[in-house]
Image (cartoon, rainbow, N blue to C red):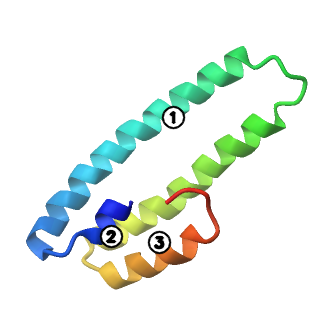
Amino acid sequence: MKDIALTTDSTADSTAVQELTVAIDGLEQDIFAAFDLLYERFRGGDQALLDSALQAVRDWKVVRDEILHLENAGLKEQADALQKSAGGQSRFS
């Protein structure tokens, strides 16, 4: 997400955002696959820790998607503001 915030050339912005979006989506699939494995192998009595971590990833996706939408719409200042405000509330950035 920080790479998106650093783009400055408007022509390159759209291409960069699209490329980074594809990369982020691929990494997200890897994360969900890792969670599947964790749930399969987790033998602890309390799965609340895994549930909490998975929910944090899902919650960040909503914010991330909005940031990417704003970037794609050319609303860089709003995207930057949302990223900064969400970054203080999330462990992901």
Mark 1 and mark 3: Cα distance apart in space: 21 Å
- Please tell me which residue is depicted at 19% across the width and 59% down the height of the picture: 16
| Residue highlighted by disc 2 | 5
Give the vertical position of 61 relative to 78 (above or below).
above
Residues at marks 3 and 2 touching, judged by CB atoms closer than 8 Å? yes
Q: Quadrant of the N terminus?
A: bottom left
Q: Mark 3 points at which residue?
A: 83
Q: Which of marks 1 and 3 is nearer the N terminus?
A: 1
Residue at left offset 81%, top offset 16%: 43
Residue 12 horizontal/vertical position (percent): 12, 66
Q: How far across and how far down the image is residue 87, in percent?
A: 55, 68
Q: Going by the picture, which residue comes out furthest to the left?
A: 11
Q: In the picture, residue 30 is in which quadrant?
A: top left
Q: Which residue is drawn at 69% across and 43% down?
A: 53
Q: What's the distance in space between the residues labelled 2 and 1, CA to CA? A: 23 Å
Q: Mark 1 points at which residue?
A: 31
What amino acid type should be assigned to the residue bearing mark 3? Gln
For marks 3 and 2, the one nearer the N-term is 2
**Left or right for 11, reference 39:** left
Looking at numbered disc 1 in the image, what kind of residue is underneath it? Ile
Residue 75 versus residue 85: which sits nearer the camera?
Answer: 85
Q: Considering only vertical position in the picture, is 4 above or below 41?
A: below
Badge 2 local density, few (<14 within 10 Å), some, or many (20+)? some
Task: List x then y, in percent, for residue 7.
Answer: 22, 69
